[in-house]
Amino acid sequence: MIRSILSASIAAIAMAGAAQAQDMTFSAGWERADFDGADFDTAVVRGAYFFNENFGVEGQLNIGVGDEEFDLGVTTVDVSMDYGVGAFAVGRIASSENFNLLGRLGYVHAELEADAANITVSEDDGAFAVGVAAEWFFDASNGVRFDYTHADFDDSVSFYGISYVRRFGG
């Protein structure tokens, strides 16, 4: 499943580069993943290609950069988010040359790991996701993005973050 999502994201970005790019963006930043009370900080990178002014595709990769500790009786359990990947269809409303509102709908896949008493358990799962974002560009190519995404795993999961955005084309 992960290979399929990554392959689709890379293929979309590669095809975008081969064609005359309408608008491509790459971004990197920080995102917090809130798994119903267990919060994980992640580094996030994204690539997006817009076919026209309003519609595009986006691929995303999150890498966990910390863990949560829980006390379970007399044992401490360390839980971490190893990674998350996602692929999205994106709709964009450009309210000005420098400000965009985005909506996205797609699929995410994440892996979490728990360690306790020399036992490690790893669990991965996928879910449909929906999100919103706002981008503000302070010049023709450089900007900042604020976003929120909700994923419907077995439990409710919220991702929210801030990223630097680099725009190409358009």
Image (cartoon, rainbow, N blue to C red):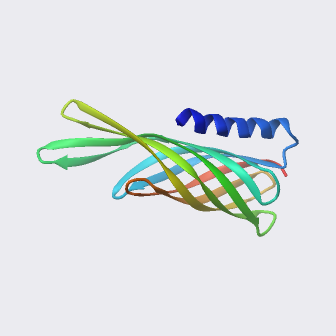
Q: Tell me the quarter of the picture where residue 162 sits.
A: bottom right
Q: Position of residue 166 (x, y in %)?
A: 72, 47
Q: How many labels, in total?
A: 0
Q: Is residue 63 left or right of residue 139?
A: left
In the orientation shown, which residue stands out farthest toward the bottom? 95
- Note whether 13 is above or below 152 in the view shown: above
Which residue corresponds to the image point at 27% horizontal and 46% vertical from the top-left?
A: 69
Q: Position of residue 47 (x, y in %)?
A: 68, 44
> In the rendered view, does 168 fall on the left or right side of 114?
right
Asked if 11 appears above or below 103 in the picture, the reply is above
Q: Is residue 54 above or below residue 43?
A: below
Q: Position of residue 20 (x, y in %)?
A: 88, 42
Left or right of 28 on screen, residue 42: left
Q: Residue at x 59, y 39 (%)?
A: 5
Residue 61, position in %: x, y?
Answer: 56, 41
Q: Is residue 74 left or right of residue 8?
A: left
Tell which of 146 and 20 is nearer to you: 20
Residue with the most extreme left position:
74
Q: Nearer the viewer, residue 41 or 119?
A: 119
Image vertical order of residue 74 relative to residue 161, above or below: above
**Residue under the image location 59 percent in, 35 percent down:** 4
* Res 115 quadrant in image: top left
Q: Residue furthest right?
A: 20
Q: Residue at x 18, y 33 (%)?
A: 117
